[in-house]
Image (tube, grey):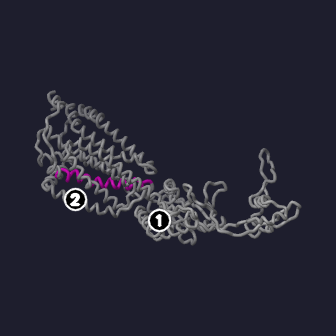
Amino acid sequence: PRPVIQIVYEASMEVRGSVVYASLIVMLVFVPLLTLGGVAGRMFEPLGEAYILAILASLFVALTVTPALCHTLLSRIGVTRTSEPPLIHWLQILYGRVLKVTCQFPKLMIISVLVLCIAGASLLPYFGGRFLPELREGHYIIHTASVPGTSLEESLRIGGLIEQQVAAIPGVRATSQWAGRAERGADTFGTHYSEYEVDLEPLSGPEQQVVLDEIREILEAFPGISSEVNTFLTERIDETISGYTSPVVVNIYGYDLDALDYKAREVAEVMADIEGATDIQLRAPPGEPQLQLRIKLEELPQWGLQPATVMQNIKAAFDGIQVGQISEGNRLFDIRVVLPPDLREQPHQILSMPLRTLDNRMLALGDVVELQQVSGRHAILHHGAQRLQTITCNVTGRDLRSFFQELQQRIHEDVQFDADTYPEFTGTAVAEAESRKDLMIHSILVGLIVLILLYMALRSVRNTWLVLLNLPFSLLGGVVAAWLTGGVLSIGSLVGFVTLFGITLRNAIMLVSHYQHPIEHEGKAWVMETAIQGALERLPSILITALVTALAMLPIAINADSPGREIMGPMAAIIIGGLISSTLLTLLVLPSVMLRYGEFNKQRLTQTETTMQRQ
């Protein structure tokens, strides 16, 4: 028998080139993830880095540690067994019989692949798209806005009713509400605005969706209340992208506030008419009732008053004025005087407020001030030195990409904008389109490098193109898996297809490069027996690779809508589905196609191999 070191060396040298090229290709297909910008880049860049580093580590182990361990173990126990395990032996017998049939009909195999690919491609127009799937955090945030000018007490009253009904939903653990804004807060919310936090008990993804649907039904039952419901992370992602807590945002820019309001209402009507639109909100609604005090400047001289004196009295009455301090130990407290709440909250009481003149005569404020109610705004939005009005909405019951496309088309057709106003569409749909475009462009650039490496591994232009032409069939399983799991492609789904692309090329390189070995180094002819023998020898490694990968992804793919699996679940499902079609391609289609159209020529042994044989 040959020395163990020679066996280990020859086996390592046989797979060295294919292992190195296959690993480099798998690492390269993840490079586009490192080029993604924005939120998508922050989310998937660590995944790409971890995968590339893991492949580098496994390549190092395969080229150094594994041969050394094989030599050590085989030298101690010896090569006592040359036959395959019973299960592998039985699979090889069955696989050999199937290959004998498929290799006799290469054209039929190609036609079958084309038909299946066309069937899979016909599903693509029906796929939707969204930036991220529904996140299941076990927590919801509700935003409500009533008519501008609604008092804080009324907002709290309505909020109490909403809390009672939401808390009665099975699965809700706790609720809380805050209304308006803090006295020195950075937000511009008025007293008509409220925010609620809803904490859930541990629930599965479908159960959380049921709770979300019931919350929306409760909110729709309150007339005059606009609302939206999201999870915390979804809101933070949407807010990072567009500045608002909704995935669909339409900004209308212009100069005339009334014209902006009119166009915003038109856009909101169009938005409400599109299937799937929900939680539609005008972010800076007009019509907030305000009290306007106008000083009668012509009356002030006869009373010896100055406008500043009148304004100081009004400010003291409603905002308070410091009149002294008291001390308790080492602490000081300001003493402020202000009108009682019942007097400040009644508009007609303002005019009867006493006002002292310089000669100590008492006047009523109504003698020098006119009071009238006007319509105002709690906020005027600006961006880039321009005024704007913003309309937002959420999407339920359909994919975000198709909704956004229909919204853009309908607004351009149904809403007329003059020269001073124009719309801007933003939100996660735009971010998803930009990320998808960047991923495609960078994937094409990486694909050119992959093509060069593939040619270097296979050393044949014809064989390279045959492997590439079979790739669509390998991706067919991923398309079917995506369709069965909802038919919506997210950024995570695209990552799954990228992973699948690398796995398919790796298996193809391992099989085709193994075909070259018996022809170039053993002098065998490229006939059916050689093709079947090479495929039988590669069967265990291909099956084990697919099985291990599928088993690793299976726990993630199961219940992909559950908390913690929303992003990786669709990716795992696509990888598992693609592994099925990829393995069938490599084992059944590729051998017959390579037998009929492949190019394998006999070559001389290399100098290194000749030297090894002499030794």
**In the image, 588: left or right of 373?**
left
Q: Residue 326 at x, y = what percent?
A: 81, 50
Q: Give the mark nearest the N terminus, 1 or 2.
A: 2
Taking the spot 57% from the left edge, 69% from the top edge, the residue there is 225
The residue singled out by tag 1 in the image is 210
The residue singled out by tag 2 in the image is 114
Q: Could you say which is closer to the camera, residue 365 or residue 511?
A: 365
Q: Amino acid at mark 2?
A: Leu
Q: Residue 300 at x, y = what percent?
A: 81, 64
- What is the crowding at mark 1: few (fewer than 14 residues within 10 Å), some, or many (at least 20)? few
- What is the crowding at mark 2: few (fewer than 14 residues within 10 Å), some, or many (at least 20)? some
**In the image, 568: left or right of 502?**
right
Residue that sits furthest to the front in the current view: 419
Taking the spot 46% from the left edge, 71% from the top edge, the residue there is 273
Q: Main secondary structure of the magenta part?
A: helix
Q: Could you say which is closer to the camera, residue 481 or residue 442?
A: 442
**In the image, 582: left or right of 603?**
right
Q: Name the quadrant of the C terminus.
A: top left
Q: Amino acid at mark 1?
A: Val
Residue that sits furthest to the top in the current view: 615
Front disc: 1 or 2 = 2
Q: Could you say which is closer to the camera, residue 478 or residue 388?
A: 388
Q: Residue 24 at x, y = what percent?
A: 30, 41
Q: State yes or no: residue 585 in magenta.
A: yes
Residue 353 vertical position relative to residue 56 in the rendered view, above or below: below
Q: Which residues are magenta?
A: 564-592
Marks 1 and 2 in Cβ contact (< 8 Å): no
In which quarter of the view is residue 161 placed?
bottom right
Residue 149 seen in the figure: no
